[in-house]
Amino acid sequence: MTNNLNSPLNGGIITHSAPQVIQTKFGDINGDGFFETIFLMGTKQPDSPLWRNLTLTIFYGQTRQMEHIPLKQNMGYNPTIFLGDFTGNHVEDILVVSDTGGSGGIVNGEIFSSINNQVRSIFDAESFNNKLKYKVNYVDHYKAVVQSFNPAIKYTIDLQYKGTDYLAEIYNPDGTLKQPIEGWVDPFGGLYPVDYDRDGTYEILGYQEIAGRYHADGLGYVENILKWNGHEFVIDRQTVGIFGEDLS
């Protein structure tokens, strides 16, 4: 919804974008036995799918009070909310995810939980990304090594599926590198709630793309499963998924 006002200062038209409800969910987020109404709200950019000023607005079923909570990363595309128990206390938490819109396919994500009757952020993707350190290096004999520092794990990817033309650009005929090549691991490109143990408590599956010489030269994905340990989210287990050779 927009309101157009004629400006006496410049004779033009100023467009004010009013907040809109993007998505609505219902659930008991504080354990009082009453359903809350959770609105994801934002300001729509004219002629653009971009949303700004993303905010959670919570209407409490028992007290009939309203609370507004701005997101840390309050701008994005295709914002959505998901309700589920991430902390194991049998009360629903709120996961908000949006796309940043960049070429890397990076997402924003934040989880809110009611602790002592106060809703607060217990996870945000940007802060968690800062804890994750990786190193990607091409090595001799048609391989790339991905080293994770948190947790400390090394993965070796066989690059021969890339084909002879790709390998010939990088390697000498004897399999040695023509020159050092470093890749990188993107921040989270996907955050998905999954109840692996089917116990009613959700973990977070986070995908991070592994890039080689350039971003479109994808080598696979680091897959982190994040679990609440009672105080914060930590990596419960980590794997690397690679792309396969097309045999068709």
Image (cartoon, rainbow, N blue to C red):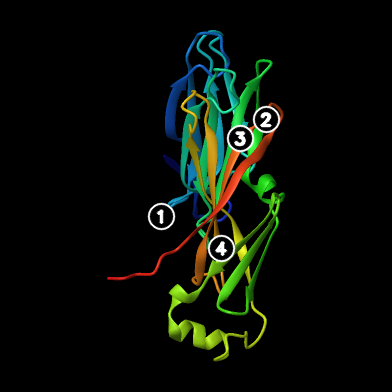
Q: In the rendered structure, are the residues bearing label 2 and label 3 in contact, judged by CB atoms less than 8 Å apart? A: yes
The residue tagged with tag 3: helix, strand or loop?
strand
Residue 161: image x %, image y %? 44, 73
- Residue 133 tag number: none
Residue located farthest toward the bottom when viewing the structure as drawn? 173
- Residue 47 tag number: 1
In front: label 1 or label 2: 2
The residue tagged with tag 4: helix, strand or loop?
strand
Amino acid identity at mark 4: Ile
Amino acid identity at mark 3: Lys
Amino acid identity at mark 1: Asp
- Residue 227 tag number: 3
Which residue is label 2 attached to?
229
Mark 1: give few (<14), some (14-19) or many (20+) Cα within 10 Å.
few
Q: Earlier in the sequence, mark 4 or mark 3?
A: 4
Q: Quadrant of residue 56?
A: top right
Q: Quadrant of the C terminus?
A: bottom left
Q: Considering depth in this image, is 29 or 50 the residue closer to the camera?
A: 29
Q: Quadrant of the N terminus?
A: top left
**Mark 2 to mark 4 CA distance (whole Å):** 27 Å
